[in-house]
Image: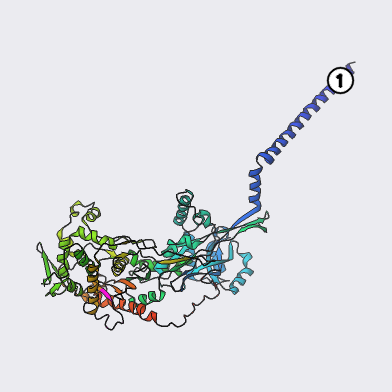
């Protein structure tokens, strides 16, 4: 019996162990089943997406940038494809210098390539692919390919690059593209957030994803202000890949849409004539079509080559441009503010007529000076101009007449009259960085000297110099040309613009950007006609007569000479002064005088007399536009292609 009990007890224990084991197994399988249900049902969507992401690679397809041409179809900015030798610093073995030295034994890498690459490296991240050499020949590509196994992190790519075929011509208008900076990326993010906010209609071109894969963006000029139009829309390609990253097949593709092409209002031939006329001197010139606001020429002298910036400018070239006393990077028509000198007098005369302070017949015997509160303001003709009425005051540029008129008008009345003509106002031209200039008034002086209360008061002596375009007056050449165009257009204001049409790259459909008339200045036509007749007199018998003798068209104009610093009553002798202290030379004009098709303003920095330095430049510009341009043209020479690259057509198919 004891043995039977022992056996029964052992059997009971065995059965208990089996039950426990079965429960344990059941529990384990239950946990597995629960986990399976959790993964396959509740979390199916999340893990399915992750699996696809591991399996699918999404690659951006960067669009080709739009082409920029002038009004006659001359290409100003285009794209070309070329081989580039690129380094990803985070992937290389050894130091950068060692890798570059080894590469230089296979392909030519000069000192400029090294300097430019190091400049790019300072502004980029180590995991970015940066170009060391651009425009490799087929032979160089073959040599590197044979040795590629030695250079992890180095590869040859085919890229679309930007080219400015005419180099320095209109560089400040066209601008240039450069590598995306942190500031650029911040602007893209801000634009994307505003685009998503619903404040305006959604534009897919402003989405931050549209810049995936893009490493260049417009920096200045039209390249910057029309970035959204030029950039195009990025495409995306979904590719199935193996665990090792090898592509297997393409799953889907959305094609990139090339950027729109821009047709500028510029006449490139006119632009080049104007640039050459400056002959190495510093200055600015703006020519406008009065009826439309088309900017025909926009010269900032000296200029620079925008091609230097596309691939990343090297430090030496940057220092040369940035430290030059001629300041070639300064956009003078847009950002250089100058006293207008006597070119201001026709507008002051018009103010006198419009505000009832003068009639055309009112005159006086000019003594050659004007005295106020013991201070003598002198004319450039010591003995005076004799009997001077308004017509003669403009033709002979009599300072004394305008000293007196400015005193009678007063600073605030002058400011109120001049503002609608664009003086001291932003014109709203379609590139960024425009300077407002200074149109003086009593309120302006209070704000300008708010930290120095002792200098806030406006004195009568401050007003006197304003009449001859001196004193606190400070305007851009663009503003002066804009005002001249308004006068030529009989007071009808047209907003100046540089882009005439936007063209779709495939359909060739165009959108006009030419604005309608902004407003009409309320001035009697007879007063405008009188001032315009006097400006014709300036060219036929006055201060600009020598420069336009024999012209085959009639011009209305006005010379100007702006003082750079005060002589404290001493006589002006240019040859005794340092070049940067000599007077600026200015000239404004429009032609033909009866039916104007072009209006212009220009300044030659430290050029001396307007009649001697500025008017001859205007003559060359007007001769081309009104005479030479209209002659039968020979066939235009083709723009030479760069060796080893393929240029795209001006209109992308």
The N terminus, quarter of image? top right
Q: Residues within 10 Å of mark 1 (few under 14, many from 20)?
A: few
Residue 511, placed above or below residue 380: above
Residue beneath the point at 47% across and 82% down: 635
Q: Residue lying farthest left?
A: 374
Q: Which residues are magenta?
A: 542-557
Instruction: From the viewer's side, name the closer residue of 320 and 175.
Output: 175
The C terminus, quarter of image? bottom right
Report if residue 102 lies within the magenta region.
no
Q: Is residue 427 left or right of residue 632?
A: left
Name which quarter of the figure residue 40 lies in: top right
Name which quarter of the figure residue 94 lies in: bottom right
Q: Which SS does the magenta portion mostly show?
A: loop
* Residue at mark 1: 8
Instruction: From the viewer's side, name the closer residue of 554 and 228.
Output: 554
Q: Is residue 250 left or right of residue 554?
A: right
Residue 196 location (% of width, % of height):
49, 49
Q: Secondary structure at mark 1?
A: helix
Number of labelled discs? Answer: 1
Instruction: From the viewer's side, name the closer residue of 526 and 640.
Output: 526
Colouring scheme applied when the structure was drawn: rainbow
Residue 436 location (% of width, % of height):
31, 60
């Amino acid at each position: 019996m004891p043995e039977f009990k022992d056996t029964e007890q052992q059997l009971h224990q065995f059965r208990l162990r089996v039950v426990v084991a079965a429960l344990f197994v059941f529990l384990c399988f239950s946990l597995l089943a629960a986990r399976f249900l959790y993964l396959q049902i509740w979390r199916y969507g999340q893990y399915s997406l992750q699996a696809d992401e591991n399996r699918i690679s999404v690659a951006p397809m960067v669009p080709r940038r739009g082409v920029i041409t002038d009004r006659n179809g001359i290409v100003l900015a285009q794209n070309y494809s070329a081989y580039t030798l690129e380094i990803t610093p985070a992937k290389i073995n050894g130091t950068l210098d060692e890798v570059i030295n080894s590469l230089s034994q296979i392909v030519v890498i000069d000192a400029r390539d090294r300097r430019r690459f190091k400049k790019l490296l300072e502004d980029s991240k180590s995991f970015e692919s940066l170009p060391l050499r651009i425009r490799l020949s087929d032979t160089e590509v073959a040599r590197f390919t044979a040795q590629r196994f030695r250079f992890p992190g180095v590869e040859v790519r085919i890229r679309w690059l930007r080219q400015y075929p005419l180099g320095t011509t209109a560089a400040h208008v066209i601008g240039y593209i450069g590598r995306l900076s942190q500031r650029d990326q911040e602007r893209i993010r801000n634009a994307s957030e505003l685009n998503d906010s619903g404040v305006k209609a959604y534009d897919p071109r402003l989405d931050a994803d549209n810049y995936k894969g893009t490493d260049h963006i417009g920096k200045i000029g039209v390249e910057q202000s029309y970035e959204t139009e030029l950039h195009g829309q990025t495409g995306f390609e979904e590719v199935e890949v193996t665990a090792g990253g090898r592509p297997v097949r393409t799953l889907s593709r959305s094609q990139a849409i090339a950027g729109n092409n821009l047709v500028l209002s510029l006449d490139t031939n006119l632009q080049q004539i104007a640039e050459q006329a400056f002959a190495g001197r510093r200055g600015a010139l703006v020519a406008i079509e009065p009826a439309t606001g088309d900017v025909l020429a926009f010269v900032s002298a000296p200029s620079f080559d925008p091609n230097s910036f596309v691939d990343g400018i090297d430090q030496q070239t940057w220092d040369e441009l940035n430290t030059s006393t001629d300041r070639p990077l300064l956009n003078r028509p847009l950002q250089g503010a100058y006293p207008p000198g006597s070119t201001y007098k026709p507008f002051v005369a018009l103010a006198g007529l419009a505000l009832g302070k003068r009639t055309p017949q009112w005159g006086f015997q000019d003594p050659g000076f004007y005295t106020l509160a013991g201070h003598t303001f002198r004319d450039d003709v010591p003995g005076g101009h004799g009997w001077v009425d308004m017509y003669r005051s403009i033709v002979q540029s009599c300072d004394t007449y305008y000293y007196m008129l400015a005193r009678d008008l007063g600073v605030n009345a002058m400011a109120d009259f001049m503002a609608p003509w664009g003086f001291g106002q932003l014109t709203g031209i379609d590139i960024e960085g425009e300077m407002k200039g200074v149109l003086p008034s009593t309120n302006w002086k209070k704000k300008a000297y708010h930290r120095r209360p002792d200098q806030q008061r406006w004195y009568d002596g401050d007003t006197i110099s304003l009449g001859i375009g001196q004193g606190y007056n400070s305007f851009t050449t663009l503003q002066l040309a804009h005002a001249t165009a308004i006068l030529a257009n009989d007071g009808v204001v047209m907003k100046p613009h540089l882009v005439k049409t936007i063209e779709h790259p495939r359909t060739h459909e165009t959108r006009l950007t030419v604005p309608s008339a902004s407003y009409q200045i309320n001035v009697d036509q007879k007063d405008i006609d009188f001032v315009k007749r006097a400006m014709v007199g300036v060219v036929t018998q006055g201060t600009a007569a020598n420069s336009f003798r024999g012209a085959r068209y009639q011009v209305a104009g006005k010379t100007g000479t702006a003082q750079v610093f005060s002589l404290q009553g001493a006589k002006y002798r240019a040859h005794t002064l340092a070049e940067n202290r000599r007077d600026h030379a200015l000239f404004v004009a429009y032609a033909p005088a009866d039916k104007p098709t072009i209006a212009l303003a220009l300044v030659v920095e430290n050029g001396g007399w307007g009649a001697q330095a500025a008017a001859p430049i205007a003559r060359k510009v007007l001769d081309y536009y009104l005479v030479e341009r209209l002659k039968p043209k020979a066939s235009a020479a083709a723009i030479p292609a760069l060796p080893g690259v393929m240029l795209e057509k001006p209109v992308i198919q």
